[in-house]
Image (cartoon, helix red, strand yellow):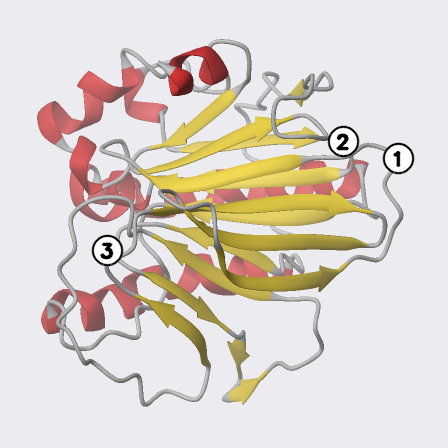
Amino acid sequence: EEMERFFATRPVVIIAGNHENIDKGRMFASRFKYPMSATPDENSVIAFSVGQLLFFGVNFDFAIQLHEEKYFETLQKLQNELHRLTSAFPSYRRVFFAHRPFVRANQKEKMYEAHSLIHRLKPFEDLVHRFDVKFHLFGHVHSYERYSFVFNYEIEKNGDSAIAIVGSGGNHEVRDGYKFPQPFVQKAIFLTPEFLLVQSKGTFLVCSFIESKTGNVLDRFNLQKSITSGNKLVLFAYLLGLGLTVSLAGSVLLGRMRKSRLYSDYRTEQESMV
C-alpha cells in the first residue's frame, strides 16, 4: 500500500529483461511502450533527461534473444540517441541502465551464459564508453555488486565512474561464502532485499545501498560531476519481476518531482556514424 501511494505520483521507467521474453516481448511492450517506439518490435531503446542528467536504457534481450536480426539496428538506435542528446546537452551527466550487465563477476553462476554475453554485449559497452557514460545500473544478477570501470585492461580509479548491479530484491541464487577474486569488484552483498538510492547533490551523485527492512545503509559511494545542477534528483533502482526499475522522485523521499523532459521525437531515419 505504501509503495502504491508512492508510485502513483512519481514517474517510473522500466527496462525489460529476460523475464519479459514471453511472446517476443509483446506482453511487456503492450503495457510499457516507450515513446520512441512505433511498434512493439521497436521497444528496445529509451533515452530521456531529468534535471541535468541524461539516461539511456537498452533491453539487451531484444537484440540477443528475441530479434537477433535486429542486433545492429538496436546498436545503431542507441548510438543515434547518445549522439543526439549528448550533442544537445554536452555538459550533462550520463547514466546507462539495462537489465543484463555487461560483465558479471560471479563466475559460479551460469558460466556459459556469462562468458558468451561478454562478447555479444561488448559493442554496446564500447559504444557507451565512447560517449563518456560513466555510471551504469544493472539488475539480473541476484545480489548487490559494485565494480570499478575496466577499459583497455586498466582499472579506472578517478572517482567519477562506477558500475552497480542492484539485483538482490527477490530470489537469491549466489552460494554462501563465494569470494570475488577480480580486483575490479569493490563491494558485494548477498541475501539482502534492498534498493539503491542515488541523489544529485551539487557536484556529486551520492549513492546509498539501503537494506529494505531496516533502512540501514550497507554501502555508499560518491561520483564526481563536471557541473553543478540546480535541480535535485532522487533515483531508486531495484530488481522487480520486470527487469530493472528506475524511479525518479523529488529532492526528498516523498518530495514533489520536478518536471522531466521525455524525448518522444525519436528520429526514424538513420544518422551518420559518429
Q: In this view, does 31 lie to the left or right of 92?
A: left
Q: Mark 3 points at which residue?
A: 142
Spatial CA distance of label 2 from label 3 is 31 Å
Q: Which of 212 and 38 is in front in this view?
A: 212
Disc 2 residue type? Gly
Instruction: Please tell me which residue is depicted at 69% across the width and 30% down the height of the picture.
Output: 252
Disc 2: CA contacts within 10 A as few (<14), some (14-19) or many (>=20): some
Q: Residue furthest front?
A: 214
The N terminus - image quarter: top left
Q: Name the residue under label 2.
A: 51
Residue 156 pos. (x, y %): 61, 81
Residue 236 pos. (x, y %): 51, 38
Disc 3 residue type? His
Q: Nearer the viewer, residue 270 or 149?
A: 149
Residue 140 pos. (x, y %): 26, 51
- Mark 2 or mark 1, which is nearer the start of the sequence? 2
Q: Mark 1 points at which residue?
A: 230
- Mark 3 or mark 2, which is nearer the start of the sequence? 2
